[in-house]
Image: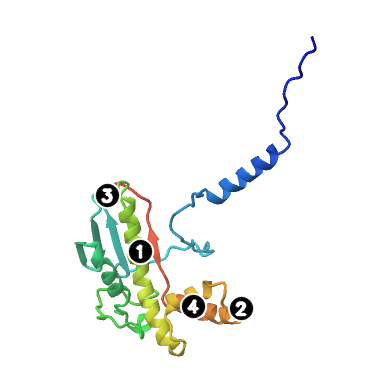
Amino acid sequence: MAKRSAPEVNAGSMADIAFLLLIFFLVTTDIAVDSGLSRKLPPIEENQDDIVIKQKNIFALNVNANNQLFLKAGEDEKLIELKDLRALAVKFLDNGGGTGKDACKRCRGAKDPKSSDNFQKAIISLSNDRLTKYKTYIAVQNEILAAYNELRNREFKREYPKLGMNFVEANDKYQDAQTKPKEKEDLKEKLEAIKLLVPQKFSEAETKNI
């Protein structure tokens, strides 16, 4: 009796099917994207001499384990609400309490001699407890950034009124891929000038138990 040959499966198209499935999963799968804060660290200073900073130029903000904000600015020490942080930071940065070489011609604040001298001297210092919630940490960072942007927006419109835009809008246009290179170069120059005028002097201490 003759033996029957075993049936064979035609696997000639298996490679094509596998390739199509791979393409399908690549197109339809959500790839996790790293999230976090976009922060550019300052360059290393060659001059390592200690810099003396007046206490009145420091806006010291502590966030404790209960997500409460404790502010020390000038002679004021108090608990504050997150909703008040931006306005308080703007008030501090824009105070203009300096005199002589520290005088601030552009500041529109109260010129309290016990608060910050000018934009260049004012520093916002943040420290967080190890148990501070990430949500609070991000919210505080956003309010501080918004305070700087508020002043930069004002100074940009003041310096370049004919452009009809503020600092944030100009920065968005600079980042836009459709903006022409010549316009980008012009915007970059103006943006850098405002960054020098209102520098973002923000220090963040290592987390600890507050």
**Residue ID at (76%, 17%):** 4
2 or 1: tag closer to the N-terminus: 1
From the image, tell me which residue sits under label 1: 142
- Measuring from the top left, give residue 111's x and y in whole percent: 26, 81
**Amino acid type for the residue under numbered disc 4:** Leu
State how far apart marks 2 and 1 are (Cα): 30 Å
- Measuring from the top left, give residue 68's x and y in whole percent: 23, 55
Asked whether disc 1 touches disc 3, contact meaning CB atoms under 8 Å apart, the reply is: no
- Measuring from the top left, give residue 210's x and y in whole percent: 27, 49
Q: Quadrant of the N terminus?
A: top right
State how far apart marks 1 and 3 are (Cα): 21 Å
Say if residue 122 shows up in the picture.
no
1 or 3: tag closer to the N-terminus: 1
State how far apart marks 3 and 4 are (Cα): 37 Å
State how far apart marks 2 and 4 are (Cα): 15 Å
Q: Secondary structure at mark 2?
A: helix
Q: Secondary structure at mark 4?
A: helix
From the image, tell me which residue sits under label 4: 191
Within-10-Å neighbours for mark 4: few <14, some 14–19, many 20+:
many
**Residue ID at (37%, 81%):** 154
**Amino acid type for the residue under numbered disc 3:** Ile
State how far apart marks 3 and 2 are (Cα): 49 Å
**Amino acid type for the residue under numbered disc 2:** Pro
Pair 3/4: label in front: 4
Pair 1/3: label in front: 1
Vertical relation: 11 (above or below) 92? above
From the image, tell me which residue sits under label 2: 181
Along the line of sight, the residue nearer the viewer: 176 or 158:
176
Pair 2/4: label in front: 2
21 relative position to 198: left or right? right
Q: Which mark is residue 210?
A: 3
